[in-house]
Image (cartoon, helix red, strand yellow):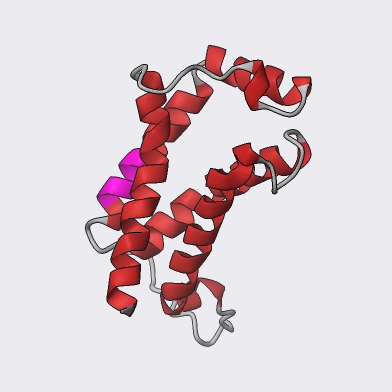
Amino acid sequence: MKKYFYVVSKVLLTGITITPIFGALGIFPDPARDMYTSDQAFNFISTLMEVGYIMSIMAFCFAATIILLWTRREAAAALLLLPFTVNIVAFHLFLDGGLLTAGAIMGNVLLLLNMYFLWQERSTYVQLLTVRSEKQIQKKPVS
């Protein structure tokens, strides 16, 4: 059962990261004012869309998801997607009316999936988070 949940989580994360690509191809409509709860949120997203920021960032997220998640590098994928996930959730929290709005659902799911993969791979991050003393660090002489 745990393995099936893991695979379904991978598929769901891939599906969420591919949705902006569908938007760029015209499959989904462009953002409209009625999709957001405030004018500031709509203006912010419109500005990011005009300069191409969202498409370039989401193309990176999609590529990172495909390459890392489906080649057994879930730990790297979770770490690379974390800043983007936090930005999406922060946008909905501070500009779009909160985390319980209709527009925030995919961001919340993305955050939960990212937290799940971070938790699953927590043993991989031990080396990044442990503090070592000077004696433990092997200094190699420069030749």
Q: Residue furthest left?
A: 71
- Locate residue 18, reporting x and y percent: 36, 37
Write down the quadrant of residue 88 in the picture: top right
In the image: residue 57, left or right of residue 87: left
- Locate residue 16, reporting x and y percent: 42, 43
Point 41% across, 23% down: residue? 28
Point 30% across, 54% down: residue? 68
Q: Quadrant of the C terminus?
A: bottom left
Q: Count the labels in the image.
A: 0
In the depicted structure, whether residue 113 falls above or below residue 98: below
In the image: residue 108, left or right of residue 58: right
Write down the quadrant of residue 4 in the picture: bottom left
In the image: residue 101, left or right of residue 108: right
Q: Quadrant of the N terminus?
A: bottom left
Numbered range of the magenta stretch = 62-67
Write down the quadrant of residue 43 in the picture: top right
In the depicted structure, whether residue 92 falls above or below residue 140: above
Point 64% across, 46% down: residue? 89
Q: Residue furthest bottom?
A: 135
Q: Nearer the viewer, residue 142 or 59?
A: 59
In the depicted structure, whether residue 38 falls above or below residue 58: above
Prevalent SS, magenta region? helix
> Is residue 69 on the magenta stretch?
no
Q: Residue furthest top?
A: 50
Q: Nearer the viewer, residue 55 or 110?
A: 110
- Locate residue 123, reporting x and y percent: 43, 80
- Locate residue 26, reporting x and y percent: 37, 16
Point 46% across, 32% down: residue? 57
In the depicted structure, whether residue 4 falls above or below residue 133: above
